[in-house]
Amino acid sequence: MKTIKFNPRYLKFRGLKIPKYATILEVFKKDRTRLDKAFVDYDTAFVDDKNQVHYYPLSSEGMQMVLLLRDDEGNLFTTIMEYKRHQPYTRWRGKRVHCKLIGRESIE
């Protein structure tokens, strides 16, 4: 089973239980310049130990991959990755993946 790593300090997970498993519903290939700033900010925002907001750095250009995932309770969530390093994910559409938590504890 494929594993996708998530840091629980991402703001998109605030107040949510990060699932142990999810299904990849779709893989979107997008040029980085075509991703709306509001979506990128939503997907990459996290807080540090001092509760300061930061944004995970993505390449400012080139192809990105957006994964649309659904947990077993029907909740949808996304993650953005560089496409060139993660092309195999396109073969995992419709498949369950393990969601592994990395990093510090979650935020409240």
Image (cartoon, rainbow, N blue to C red):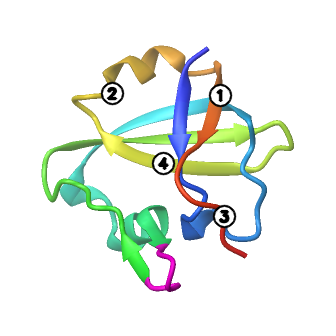
Residue designated by label 1: 98
In the image, residue 48 lies in the stretch drawn in magenta: yes
Give the residue type at disc 4.
Answer: Thr
Decide which of tag 2 and tag 4 comes sooner along the chain: 4
Residue designated by label 3: 106
The x and y percentages for residue 81 are: 35, 43
Give the residue type at disc 2.
Answer: His
Distance between mark 2 and mark 1 Cα atoms: 16 Å
What label does residue 86 carry, if any? 2
Q: Secondary structure at mark 4?
A: strand
Residue designated by label 4: 79
Query: Do tag 2 and tag 1 residues touch (Cβ < 8 Å)?
Result: no
Give the residue type at disc 3.
Answer: Ser
Left or right placement of residue 60 versus residue 86 in this view: left
Query: Do tag 4 and tag 3 residues touch (Cβ < 8 Å)?
Result: no
User: Foreground residue, 24 or 106?
Assistant: 106
Crowdedness of circle 4 by 10 Å Cα count: few (<14), some, many (20+)?
A: some
Distance between mark 2 and mark 3 Cα atoms: 26 Å
Total marks drawn? Answer: 4
